[in-house]
Image (spheres, rainbow, N blue to C red):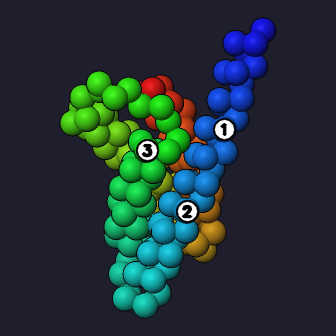
């Protein structure tokens, strides 16, 4: 029973930390998206790709060193490649949601970004937990 309680507490701690890291990554992503689109006149899909990529690097480093208990003997190149592949899939999910939300349904791109971020966040937690630990 104690083992189950410890596992649960560990999971809650990870989810909390993941939320903090994800919230910060969201602010980075959202801020860059807004600035590039509104002030630099970059198309929202290109801005989204750039902002997502910057936030992924932050998220990787934070997840690796603060959220998940990564095996020290893990092959760091292989680990990063898996992270990168999962992130590219996440970017694809993000871009599809952005395109559908903005171009097909006419939803303001910043609101669509919030929806996309929530969906990708769930995907990220599940896949990173599976592959990083």
Quadrant into which the N terminus falls:
top right
Specify whether 4 is left or right of 106: right
Q: CA distance from mark 1 to mark 3?
A: 14 Å
The residue carrying mark 1 is 13
Specify whether 23 is left or right of 59: right
How busy is the neighbourhood of tag 1: few (under 14 within 10 Å), some, or many (20 plus)? Answer: some
Q: Residue at x 41, y 42 (%)?
A: 64
Specify whether 19 is left or right of 60: right
* Mark 3: secondary structure: helix
The residue carrying mark 3 is 65
Residue 8: x percent and y percent? 71, 24
Q: Residue at x 61, y 46 (%)?
A: 17
Q: Is residue 104 visible?
A: no
Quadrant into which the C terminus falls:
top left
Q: CA distance from mark 3 to mark 2?
A: 15 Å
Which numbered tag is attached to residue 24?
2
Q: Residue at x 75, y 13 (%)?
A: 2
* Mark 2: secondary structure: helix
């Amino acid at each position: 029973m104690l083992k189950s309680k410890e596992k649960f507490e560990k999971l809650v701690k990870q989810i909390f930390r993941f939320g903090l890291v994800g919230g910060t990554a969201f602010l980075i992503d959202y801020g860059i998206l807004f600035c590039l689109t509104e002030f630099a006149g970059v198309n929202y899909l290109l801005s989204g790709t750039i902002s997502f990529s910057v936030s992924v690097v932050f998220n990787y480093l934070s997840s690796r060193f603060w959220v998940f208990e990564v095996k020290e003997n893990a092959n760091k190149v292989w680990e990063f490649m898996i992270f990168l592949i999962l992130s590219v899939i996440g970017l694809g999910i993000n871009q599809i949601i952005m395109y559908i939300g903005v171009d097909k349904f006419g939803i303001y791109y910043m609101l669509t970004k919030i929806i996309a971020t929530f969906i990708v966040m769930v995907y990220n937690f599940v896949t990173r937990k599976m592959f990083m630990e």
